[in-house]
Image (spheres, rainbow, N blue to C red):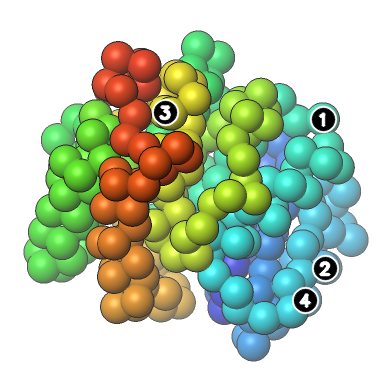
């Protein structure tokens, strides 16, 4: 699943690169009415290849809700055993997809991790890299989750894992979604594993990161820790997280 907003320069190439990894893969593009015509490009791709699907949303409504709608469509309209999420800007290498799928043979959620085997990030300014590393340390410390890359957008889920997560209760819209869904999985005793990947900064297009996205993630981790019931911090033993599958 690829959430997109103004990714016309990338979407055709990324879809092609994904489908090259395995003939059984399908691609769902969730587009938020991109002004640059990304949705129209995806429609043309879908006409050429039945493995490509499009979910068009009426407006830019947040990354978290795009993931939730995409997951629901995947669960409701396909018999897929696994559901992957990744960015459409080539910061996540499609060649890593087989490794995430392999990890999910023994895990419920596999995270493509930039930080579980050193720092594996290319072409980021030092300031942005420092912010990302510190943000992940902060999120792990507050939530109690022993995961080194909680904000990674490159993940693979077993179908059975997604079916256990109450998607309707996810409250975050931005990149905080990545933290919240791992927290929800860990609370339910699902097996979460980090797989080291190389992350490269986008070449075409521009980042959608904003101050609101950063602020949302900052307060969300405290909400997860302090709220009762669904938001309570998970027990480390119950979470059963394994790091660094090669």
The picture places residue 59, in percent across and down from the top left corner, at 67, 81
Q: Secondary structure at mark 1?
A: loop
Image quarter (top left, top right, bottom left or bottom right) of the C terminus: top left
For mark 2, does the 10 Å Cα neighbourhood hold few (<14), some (14 to 19), or many (20 or more) residues?
Answer: few
Give the residue at x 80% y 55%.
Answer: 53
State how far apart marks 1 and 3 are (Cα). Answer: 24 Å
> Above or below — where is 150 with respect to 32?
above
Q: Earlier in the sequence, mark 2 or mark 3?
A: 2
- Badge count: 4
Mark 4 or 3: in front is 3
Could you say where residue 124 lies in the image, as x and y percent from the top left?
21, 63
At label 4, counting other C-alpha atoms closer than 10 Å, the crowd grade (few under 14, some 14-19, many 20 or more) is: some
Asked if residue 190 is positioned above or below residue 232 in the image, the reply reads: above
Per the image, label 4 sits on a secondary structure element best described as helix
Image spot of residue 169 (x, y percent): 58, 50
Query: Is residue 159 left or right of 126 when viewed as pictured?
Result: right
Query: Closer to the camera: disc 1 or disc 4?
Result: 1
* C-alpha span from label 4 to label 2: 6 Å
Q: Residues within 10 Å of mark 1 (few under 14, many from 20)?
A: few
Residue occupied by mark 1:
79
- Which numbered dot is residue 186? 3
Q: Secondary structure at mark 2?
A: helix
Front in this rendered view, residue 229 or 132? 229
Q: Which residue is mark 4?
A: 40
Q: Contact (CB < 8 A) between labels 4 and 2?
A: yes
Query: Cα distance, mark 4 to mark 3?
Result: 38 Å
Residue 245, numbered label: none
Identify residue for label 2. 44
Residue 128 image-quadrant placement: bottom left
Q: Residue at x 42, y 28 (%)?
A: 186
Residue 154 as seen in the image, left or right of residue 240: right
Neighbor class of circle 3 (other Cα within 10 Å; few <14, some 14-19, many 20+) is many
């Amino acid at each position: 699943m690829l959430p997109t907003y103004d990714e016309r320069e990338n979407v055709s190439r990324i879809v092609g690169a994904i489908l090259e990894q395995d003939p059984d893969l399908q691609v769902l593009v969730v587009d938020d009415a991109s002004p640059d015509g990304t949705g129209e490009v995806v429609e043309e791709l879908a006409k050429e290849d039945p493995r490509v699907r499009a979910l068009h949303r009426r407006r830019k409504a947040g990354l978290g809700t795009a993931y939730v709608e995409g997951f629901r469509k995947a669960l409701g309209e396909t018999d897929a055993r696994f559901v992957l999420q990744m960015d459409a800007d080539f910061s996540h290498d499609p060649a890593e997809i087989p490794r995430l799928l392999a990890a999910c043979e023994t895990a419920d959620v596999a995270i493509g991790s930039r930080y579980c085997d050193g720092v594996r990030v290319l072409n980021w300014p030092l300031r942005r890299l420092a912010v990302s590393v510190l943000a992940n340390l902060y999120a792990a410390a507050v939530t109690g989750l022993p995961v080194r890359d909680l904000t990674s957008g490159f993940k693979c889920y077993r179908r059975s894992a997604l079916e256990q997560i109450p998607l309707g209760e996810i409250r975050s819209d931005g990149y905080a979604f990545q933290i919240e869904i791992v927290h929800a999985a860990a609370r339910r005793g699902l097996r979460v594993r980090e797989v080291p990947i190389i992350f490269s900064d986008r070449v075409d297009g521009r980042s959608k990161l904003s101050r609101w996205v950063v602020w949302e993630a900052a307060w969300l981790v405290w909400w997860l820790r302090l709220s009762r019931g669904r938001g309570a911090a998970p027990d480390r033993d119950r979470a059963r997280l394994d790091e660094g599958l090669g």
